[in-house]
Image: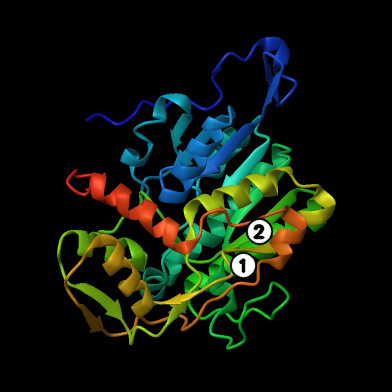
Amino acid sequence: MAPPRSRKIGETWGTRCPAESASRTILYYGHSMAIYLVTGVAGFIGSTLARALIARGEQVRGIDNFSTGKRENLTECVSRIELHEVDLLDLDALHRACRGVDYVLHQAAIPSVPRSVKDPLENNRANVDGTLNLLVAARDAKVKRVIYAASSAAYGDTPTLPKREDMLPNPISPYAVAKLAGEYYMTSFYRCYGLETVSLRYFNVFGPRQDPTSPYSGVLAKFITQMLKGEEATILGDGKQSRDFTYVDNVVDANLLACQVDAKAAAGQVFNVATGQRADLYQTFQVLKKLIGYRGDVKYGPERAGDVKHSLADISRAEQYLGYRPKVDFEEGLSRTIEWYRSHQMKPRFAKP
C-alpha cells in the first residue's frame, strides 16, 4: 500500500482563511480549535494522542521520521491530520513544522535502554540534539507550551520507593541520561526564554499499537503476543523486578491536562505520570495467564544491561497541580490491550515500513 500523502508544511490546510493568519487559534462555528504538533506521531503513544485530539475536535499536525514509528498506526486517522516525514535533526523543517502551532507534544525519541547502551551516540543525537532543535524551533515560533515525554529512567536504581520528583536523579543508561538532559533543557528554555514547558516522567507505558516485534519493545507487548500465540513467555532476570505499569490512555490524559493547566502551577516543572501501584514481572505473567487463558509456563533469560530493578511513582504532585488521576487501572489496561492484540495479531501490522 502506498504511504499516506503528506502536504507540504507552510501550504494552506483545513478551512483557515487569510484573515485568520494572524491568530494561531482557529474558530469553527464558535469552537476554539487549537493547533497541536505531535512529534513521533506514528509511535504508539503519539498515535494515541493524535486520536484523542481528533476526538476533541482539535487540529493535529504530526511529524515522524518513521525510524521506529509505523504508518499503520495512523491508518484510521491519517486523513484527519497534517502528516509530515521530518527528522528532529533537521532544524529548518522543525521551524516550518512549528509555524502557527499552539502546543507541542514531544513524544519523538529512540525509547530504548538496550539500544542506547549499544549505540550511545545515536541515542544522544535523537534524544538530546533532536529535543534541543525542537525547543529552538518552538521558541522562535512563539509556541504557547511544549509538553515533553520524560522518563522514570531518570531515577535510576535509587532504592527509595516511591519515586518523587524532588529526589536526586541517578540515571544509569545513556537513554536515561539523554531523557534527563531533555528535562533540563525544558526548564532552561522556560527560565531563559519564557517558553512554557512541562516534563512528564512516564512510568512503563503500555497499550495498543506497541510494537512487540522489536528487540527493544516493552515487556508487556512481548508477553501478550507470545502468550496469544501459545508461545513460551520469557522474563529477562529473576521475575522479581517490579514496575509501575501505566496504560497509555492515562498518559494521554496527563498530556492534555498539562496543556491547559495554569502556567503558575506547571511551567518549567516535572511530574510523574503513572498509577502509583506496582507489580513484579512474575505476578504480571500470572495475571496475563488468567486473562488470556494461557496454559504454558514462563522461561527466564539474562537481565538486560542498564535496566532498573524496581519502579514505583508518587503521583501526588501531578494530582495536585495537573488534576491528574489515572482512569484506567493495571488489570483493565491489560484487558484492553489483550483484546486489541487479539483482534490484530493475524494481520501483518508490524512489518518494517
Q: Nearer the viewer, residue 81 or 129?
A: 81
- Quadrant, the N terminus: top left
Q: Of the residues shown, which amino acid type is indicated by label 1?
A: Ala
User: Who's the residue at 55% across and 35% down the image?
Assistant: 53
- Quadrant, the C terminus: top left
Q: Nearer the viewer, mark 2 or mark 1?
A: 2
User: Who's the residue at 48% across and 77% down the image?
Assistant: 173
At mark 2, the secondary structure is: strand
Place of residue 85 in the rendered image (x, y in percent of width and height, measured from the top left): 42, 37
Please tell me in which quadrant of the rendered image residue 168 appears.
bottom right
At mark 1, the secondary structure is: helix
Q: Residues within 10 Å of mark 1 (few under 14, many from 20)?
A: many
Residue that badge 1 annotates: 181
Residue 234, label in figure: none
User: Who's the residue at 34% across and 33% down the image?
Assistant: 75
- The chosen color scheme is rainbow
Q: Can you say whether 235 is above or below 28 in the image?
A: below
Instruction: Mark yes or no: residue 350 visible.
Output: no
